[in-house]
Amino acid sequence: MKDPFDYLDEASKHLIDALSLVTVIGTLIDMLPSVAAVFTIAWTAIRIYETKTVQGWLGKNNAINK
């Protein structure tokens, strides 16, 4: 299955990550609704899971290199 974020360049991913972080901080200080927190936590978890470090821990380094 193809990664749906393959078409995004790194700058776009970093921008989305920054927005995600701002959303997490805003949620923690009760400025945003809980629904936004769920989506932000999901996005952040996906991005952490995609890192080379986590993929290495899971023994999936070959999947990243393809």
Image (tube, rainbow, N blue to C red):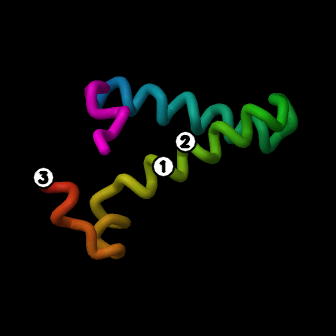
Marked residue nearer the N-terminal end (2 or 3): 2
Examine the image and state in which quarter residue 34 appears: top right
Can you tell which quarter of the image residue 27 is in?
Answer: top right
For residue 42, side relative to residue 12 (left or right): right
Which of 26/48 is in front? 48
Pointer 2 residue: 43
Mark 2 → mark 3, Cα distance in angstroms: 23 Å
> What numbered label is drawn on residue 46?
1
Position of the N terminus, as image quadrant, is top left
**Which residue corresponds to mark 3?**
66
Task: Give the mark toward the camera: 2 or 3.
Answer: 3
Q: Amino acid at mark 1?
A: Ile
Give whichever of discs 1 and 3 has the lower sequence position: 1
Identify the residue shown where x is 27% and y is 26%.
Answer: 7
- Residue at position x 33%, y 40% from top? 3
| Residue interval drawn in magenta | 1-9
Q: Dot 1 surroundings within 10 Å: few (below 14), some, or many (20 or more)?
A: few
